[in-house]
Amino acid sequence: MKKTLAAFAAIAALSFSFVSCADKAEGAKAQGGEATSAADASYAFGLAIGTSLKDTGVELDYDEFLKGMKDYIEDREQRMSMEDAQMTIQSAIMQAMQAIAARNSEAEAAFLAENGKKAGVTTTASGLQYEVIKLGTGPKPIESDTVRVDYVGTFLDGKEFDSSINAGEPVVFPVAMVIPGWVEGLQLMPVGSKYKFYIPSALAYGEQGSQGGIEPNKTLVFEVELLGIEPAAE
């Protein structure tokens, strides 16, 4: 449901964006700017709409997709009402998310079963898997602490989705405020350590996934370096 609402919100935001862009285009034209060709405008609209639709996971019949747009834009007879269209979109997105969740769940089970057999990989009672890349000598944080870390987050295929290193500076946050896999894993690390966490979806974003591009039942892999424990606030 969150994915469905997010998709509707994205499409609505896109509409407002088009209005804003149209106003800017009129201003540029009034100042003698070059006119935009129909081909360029059409392609740009396709890219923008595709941006909103891609993350839904819905497989599209492009002939019917274009027919629906043309029927509406050219005031032709439409084979479903807008209310029915919204219900159809909602149903299609939910089915797509269910298929993605099932695929990711299967991949996760297979990966964790094999990964847990590797030398150096430890599996905790919760299902979190980790390996020690570098072992520090400092104290271990507790759940009420605030820590400073550097990290890189990837999916099982190696695709990077988040990184404090790419952002240019470490992050500081309370241990209790992150996903369960991090809460548990950080408390295993002495300051100065670098660990690799293999976090099952149940200890991450679960069946809902995240609007930041993390699919339902997605396994997350993090390399985390614990740089320090921040002094307690007075």
Image (spheres, rainbow, N blue to C red):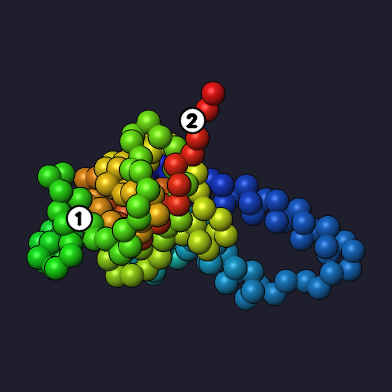
**Is 161 in front, or is 97?**
161
Q: Which amino acid does label 1 sit on?
A: Gln
Query: Residue 205 at x, y = what percent?
Result: 30, 45
Q: Identify the element where label 1 is drawn.
A: strand
Which residue sits at x=44%, y=37%? 146
Q: Which residue lies furthest to the front in this view?
A: 137
- Residue at the spot of label 1: 129
Name the residue rendered at 29%, 70% in the picture: 157
Nearer to us in this view, 216 or 186: 186
Q: Which of marks 2 and 1 is in front?
A: 2
* 24 left or right of 165 in image: right
- Quadrant occupied by the C terminus: top right
Q: In this view, does 30 lie to the left or right of 106?
A: right
The residue closer to the viewer here, 76 or 64, is: 64
Kind of residue sitting beneath label 2: Ala
Question: What distance separates the C-alpha of mark 2 from that of mark 1?
Answer: 29 Å
Res 185 seen here: yes
Say which residue label 2 marks: 232
